[in-house]
Amino acid sequence: MQKKNYFVLVLISLIVLVLAACGGEQSSSSESGESADSGTSKKEGNTLNVGLDADPPQLDPHFSTAAVDRQVYQSIYDKLVDVDENLNIIPQLAKEWEISEDGKTYTFLLQEGVTFHDGTPFNAEAVKFNLERMLDPSIGTARTSEISSIETVEVVDDLTVKVQLKEAFSPFLSVLSDRAGMMVSPTAVEEKGEDFSNSPVGTGPFKFVERVKQDKIVVEANKDYWGGAPKVDKIVYRPYTDENVRKTNLVSGKTDIVNKIPPKDVEELKNNSDITLSEVPGPGFQGLYLNHKSEPFNNKALRQALDLVIDREAIIKVALHGTAVPAASAIAPSSWAYDESIKPKERDIEKAKQLMSDAGYPDGFSFTLKLAPSPVEEQVSQMIQSMAAEAGIKVEIEMVEFGTMIDQMDNYEFDAIRLGWSGRIDPDGNIHSLFRTDGTINYGYSNEKMDQLLDDARSESDQEKRKELYSQAMKLGQEEVPFIFIYHETDYKAYKNYVKDFKHIPDTMMRFHNISLEN
């Protein structure tokens, strides 16, 4: 009977998705104020309108904790280094660098003639100010843990800065390709204090103009940009938390490009002749965070049993419309550290029942699965609920506002959470924080062997040796189940055909310095 119920749920899910796809556009068009049938092949004016999935909470990169913030940062701020389409580290504000043989000293040669938007010179003193600001415990930035390996920052001359690490840390350059490497104006920070986030100043290709919360963020071209003036005059970022509204505004032409596409709309946008849909493998992972400090998931056998009841392929096919791949670990297929020999778990109800019986739970167990409100999240969770029921595992689903859910995670007020991680370009940024005892997204899991593997991988400079260490950590993770991996998302960017020269970088961030609009 339980198996029958599972397949009935799959059928119902398919019907719901078809109805949503038919009705979603009509219901959202009144909210956006635009009809969805006025696609255009040319763009009027030279302003780029960008649709985001949320309103960025924080415009100071050193305090940011939200992924959506980083979309806007790509316009306002430069980093010491950046990444290309293959996720290779490339120069940005640092045009060259040398790494000492022991991997503990990084010497950066900076670009000449760079100024912040307020006229402050960018130089070695500015780099020292930024790094020390992020390290200052009295300030308490969100970047401190990312660059905690830094021991000293020395100004060698105006365009040379030397960073001494406490110990070798191979992911250091990759860390500097994200928010920890973004340079803010020392003058603006000192003058504005906590208000800096409301009028940010960087060295990037666009200057901040204004912000109206929950409505828009406006930036204008930095005509004196050291890397060459942008080809568009202005960018207006607008948040559309309703995915149907976001899509409708793109189709109608009110928005030129969007950062996220719901799975149900991928096929429709692929077939829209006015829109380009770009896709790359995402660097992150999605699954279930487990609370290891209390029952039931302080019991390894019960974690293993839940892991075995999940049909990853069914979830991807039904709830995600094929827009993901099954996950076996924190390291996505796009990473150089990905080990294709480590396969996702295959569904095995009988083995799950045996594990529970051997652990003293012959009748199964129960837990509450929390999730943020979202049609896709709800459907994924309902499918997990039905799958688990076949093995006698009772899952109660509870929808919680996202911010509240994060607070509950921080206070260990949960059994399991349906959530993921946006991903980092170096595998350390995915797996160390998740699996190590003191990791920032670790919820009570601890294993000395795992800690040693991850620490060794951080200090190892040879990439092949690092890969082997991560493979060992992933295999141990499959046995220990600190986190239940379900899928790796594909990253989609959709934009009107008149948007030219957009490069889709697999770190999921949108860069607009070199794009142009066909008028």
Image: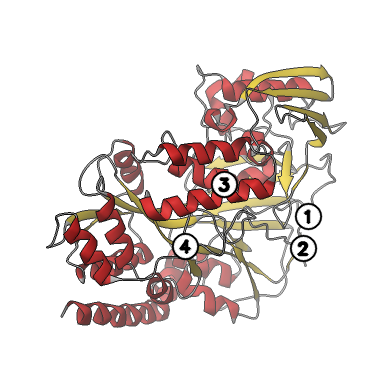
Q: Which mark is residue 501?
A: 2
| Residue in the foreground of this view, choosing between 463 and 173 | 463
Residue furthest to the right in view is: 112
Would you say residue 9 is visible in this rendering? yes
Q: Of the residues tagged 2 and 4, which is closer to the observer? A: 4
* Amino acid marked by disc 2: Asp
Left-right relation of 44 to 8 = right
> Distance between the Cα atoms at labels 2 and 4?
32 Å
Q: Of the residues tagged 4 and 3, which is closer to the observer? A: 3
> Distance between the Cα atoms at labels 1 and 4?
34 Å
* Amino acid marked by disc 1: Asn
Rendered image quadrant of residue 397: bottom left
Seen at 40% across and 41% down, the residue is 442
Locate the C terminus and report the quarter of the image it occupies: bottom right
> Distance between the Cα atoms at labels 2 and 3?
39 Å
Left-right relation of 6 to 157 = left
Seen at 54% across and 27% down, the residue is 144
Q: Residues within 10 Å of mark 1 (few under 14, many from 20)?
A: some
Q: Which residue is mark 3?
A: 469
Q: Are marks 2 and 1 in contact (CB under 8 Å)?
A: yes
